Amino acid sequence: MSRARITISLTGIEHLTGGIGGVLDFARAADAAGADQLTVSEHVAMGREIIGYPYGRYPSTVDADWYEPVALLSAVAAVTSRARLSTSILIAPLRPAVLLAKQLATIDQLSGGRLEIGLGTGWQKAEYDGCGVPFDGRTALLDEQVRAMRALWTSAPASFAGRHVAFDGLYSLPFPRQPGGVPIWFGIAPGPANVARIAEHGAGWAPWFGLPSGDAARDIGRAEALARIAEGRARIHAALAARGRDPAGFAIRVMPEPVLGAEGFDLGATIGSAADYLAAGATHLEFAPGLFCRSADALPEALAAILALRG
């Protein structure tokens, strides 16, 4: 089994610690304990009804807290020193490309070059409607955003001409700390068009299969998730090689399916499945301690158990 790189999700920690200050305290502790990567999740807003969620029953409520990830990652960068920083996904089309490029470059500078941003398109039309962004065509917009940000991160002045994003002779400085710009990970399904997208622009892939919902008709189960990871890895690696890129440096971050026990999700049993995900091709295993703990007092023990996988 290859060495596991461990990602710790900060999502849901605030419910255990009583607020965002506790999230930052936990981020600091996870960084000091040796986490390889810290992630945050997002919704800009939630509609009154859950319509379009593709992974079975939605595992939260519409009135749950969702901190804005650019702002939160800036704070996390300020209280950590070594872990890489990322998003499970950031719904890029909800933001202007030029502004997003500057925000991400700023976080990369603030963190000393530790940002690797996860991008996707989301699934909720109400969120797009509220932001005044067309839901249809969001993937084409994401494509242009990525290309436009790359231009702004590597050239000054920069120019880009697309259907959705266009500018000429813009200076957006400073560039990110990392040469070539912020590494981009994609949280998208590995269909043919997306595989090409990932191979052209991606440093990593972050597949998501949802949390167990109790809906047998929609839950895919661990075996199918592992098969999809392995199949997606093979497709992406082939596409990378066809473009002259070395697949060995490509990252795949997977959250092992939380195992349901008698009193909620069972962390020990979930950790026990880690080898299966690494065998399927994962390079990073993501765990959300907030799913497994009932109080803040339980977080240190849970964190230590998760990070033991790094050995």
Image (cartoon, rainbow, N blue to C red):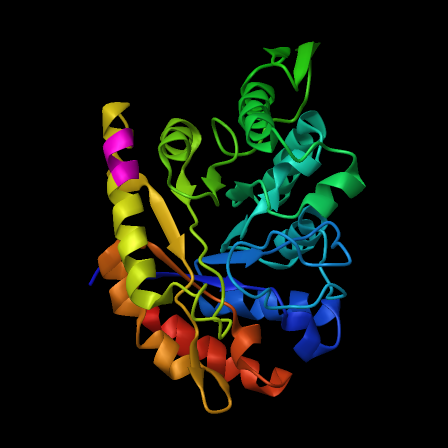
262 or 20, which is in the foreground? 262
Q: Quadrant of the N terminus?
A: bottom left
The image shows residue 49 at horizontal and vertical percentages of 73, 59
Q: Going 47% across and 41% down the picture, which residue do you hit?
A: 186
Does the magenta-highlighted stretch encompass residue 272? no
212 or 306, which is in the foreground? 212
Q: Residue furthest bottom?
A: 262
The image shows residue 197 at horizontal and vertical percentages of 42, 30
The image shows residue 61 at horizontal and vertical percentages of 70, 68
Along the horizontal axis of the image, is 116 left or right of 294? left
Q: Tally the marks.
A: 0
Location of residue 158 with respect to 214 vertically, above or below: above
Q: Which image quarter: residue 48?
A: bottom right
Q: Residue furthest left?
A: 1
Q: Is residue 311 among the parts visible in the rendering? A: no
Along the horizontal axis of the image, is 203 left or right of 10? left
- Magenta residues, start to end: 235-239
Q: Quadrant of the C terminus?
A: bottom left
Along the horizontal axis of the image, is 153 left or right of 217? right
Q: Going 38% across and 63% down the picture, which residue do you hit?
A: 220
Location of residue 131 with respect to 71 vertically, above or below: above
Q: Is residue 61 among the parts visible in the rendering? A: yes
Q: Which image quarter: residue 162?
A: top right
Location of residue 188 with respect to 30 vertically, above or below: above
The image shows residue 143 at horizontal and vertical percentages of 53, 26
Q: Residue furthest front?
A: 217
Q: Going 39% across and 26% down the picture, which residue do you hit?
A: 200
Q: Going 56% across and 26% down the picture, which residue do you hit?
A: 140
Q: For the stretch drawn in magenta, what is the main secondary structure?
A: helix
Location of residue 110 with respect to 105 vertically, above or below: below
